Image: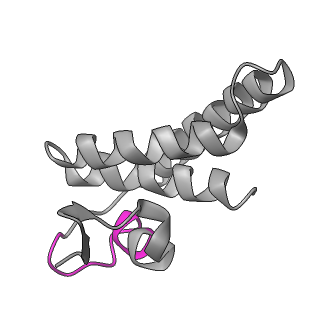
Amino acid sequence: MDAMISGWRNPPWADLARVLRRWLGASPARHVRFSEADRAVITAQGKALMLLATMLHARGVMDMEEFAGTLAVFSVVVAEDNAAEGDILAVWAGLMKDGR
């Protein structure tokens, strides 16, 4: 069970290792496994998100931290319907927040 803060799940980057383990399919409760092709698509899409966030930041439209925070909130909303998709978005939000 996820830790709760004021009725909301902790921010996705709060426990990035847990999210990464789930994302990679190591969670026995979820049994989600991604193929090599799935991982390539997830990685490519994440890199595209990073490029978009970098361009928005460089043009002064939105700070990278704000983009990451918005993506993190979106990941929680998405996880309501699809936990695996929410975890993937949370991983990318966490990586952006950490500046990777």
Residue 41 is inside the magenta segment: no
Q: Residue at x 20, y 81 (%)?
A: 28
Residue 27 is inside the magenta segment: yes
Q: Position of residue 65 (x, y in %)?
A: 66, 45
Quadrant holding the N terminus:
bottom left
> Residue 40 or 86: which is nearer the viewer?
86
> Residue 66 or 74: which is nearer the viewer?
66
Range shown magenta: 20-30
> Residue 58 or 46: which is nearer the viewer?
58
Q: Looking at the picture, does residue 57 appear above or below residue 20?
A: above
Q: Position of residue 19 (x, y in %)?
A: 40, 69
In the displayed structure, does residue 65 sit left or right of residue 40? right
- Main secondary structure type of the part rendered in magenta: loop
Residue furthest right in the image: 58
Q: Residue at x 61, y 33 (%)?
A: 49
In the displayed structure, does residue 16 sit left or right of residue 81? right
Q: Residue at x 47, y 72 (%)?
A: 14
Q: Residue at x 49, y 51 (%)?
A: 39
Quarter of the image where one finds residue 51: top right
Q: Position of residue 63 (x, y in %)?
A: 71, 35
In the displayed structure, does residue 64 sit left or right of residue 24? right
Q: Position of residue 32 (x, y in %)?
A: 25, 63
